[in-house]
Image (cartoon, rainbow, N blue to C red):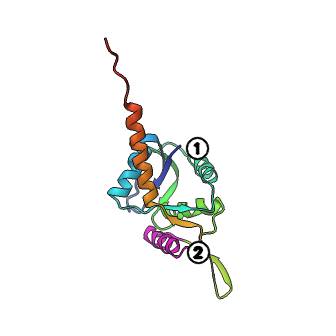
């Protein structure tokens, strides 16, 4: 089962435009494929595979957050409110990192001069730059998964077309 989660300021936004309802959206099936395809083609998103966490574990963590969410004040919002979004402290990057760390990843663990610490990201482009660099370096269980995601989209779209095909009754 293909599941896509996306978090952001999709609902009620505060006057300053930097905060508002933090909405988690969960998509499956055709909606997930459409979202992935749009992110790959229109947004030029980067996808990464984190090899030291299981899909089941991360799904359980995020589904738990999703299931504890509440309806949005904004009737157009497709997800659930999980917290107060803040551009500076509670955004897509902070949640992605928290959920991965909660699932047990060590991709953010670093050591400099014998001092061990964990990288922390608030700015999405900084997180993307870090993941891109670490994936290229190849020392952590992290790989660029854009080609894999493109292949998944192609396969899932083909599967949906086949499922939509039927036989025509002859008379």
* Quarter of image, res 169: top left
Q: Position of residue 13 (x, y in %)?
A: 40, 55
* Magenta span: chief secondary structure: helix
Q: Can residue 104 be seen from the camera position used here?
A: yes
- 2 or 1: mark nearer the eye: 2
Q: Can residue 21 be seen from the camera position used here?
A: no
Residue shown at the point (43%, 63%) measured from the top left: 46
Q: Is residue 116 left or right of residue 10?
A: right
For residue 93, above or below residue 20: below
For residue 133, above or below residue 48: below
Magenta-drawn stretch contains 133: yes
Query: Which residue is labeled 1 in the image?
Result: 67
Number of labels in the image equals 2
SS assignment at label 2 = loop
Magenta-drawn stretch contains 69: no
Q: Position of residue 112 (x, y in %)?
A: 62, 85
Residue at the farthest front position: 170
In the image, 132 versus 17, the foreground residue is 132
Query: Which residue is labeled 2 in the image?
Result: 139
The quadrant in which the C terminus is found is top left
The part of the chain drawn in magenta is: 121-138
Q: CA distance from mark 2 to mark 1?
A: 35 Å
Residue at the farthest top position: 171
Q: Earlier in the sequence, mark 2 or mark 1?
A: 1
Q: Position of residue 133 (x, y in %)?
A: 49, 75
């Amino acid at each position: 089962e293909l599941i896509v989660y996306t978090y952001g300021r999709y609902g009620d936004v505060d006057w300053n435009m930097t905060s508002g309802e933090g909405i988690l959206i969960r998509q499956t099936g055709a909606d997930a494929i459409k979202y992935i395809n749009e992110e790959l083609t229109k947004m030029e998103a980067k996808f990464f595979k984190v090899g030291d966490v299981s899909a089941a574990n991360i799904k359980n963590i995020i589904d738990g957050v999703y299931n504890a969410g509440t309806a949005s004040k904004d009737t157009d919002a497709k997800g659930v409110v999980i917290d107060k979004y803040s551009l500076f402290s509670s955004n897509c990057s902070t949640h992605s990192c928290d959920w991965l760390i909660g699932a047990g990843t060590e991709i953010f663990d670093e050591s400099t001069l014998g001092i061990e610490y964990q990288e922390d990201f608030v700015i999405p482009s900084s997180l993307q730059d870090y993941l891109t660099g670490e994936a290229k370096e190849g020392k952590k269980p992290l790989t660029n998964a854009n080609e894999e995601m493109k292949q998944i989209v192609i396969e899932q779209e083909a599967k949906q077309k086949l499922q939509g095909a039927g036989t025509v009754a002859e008379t």
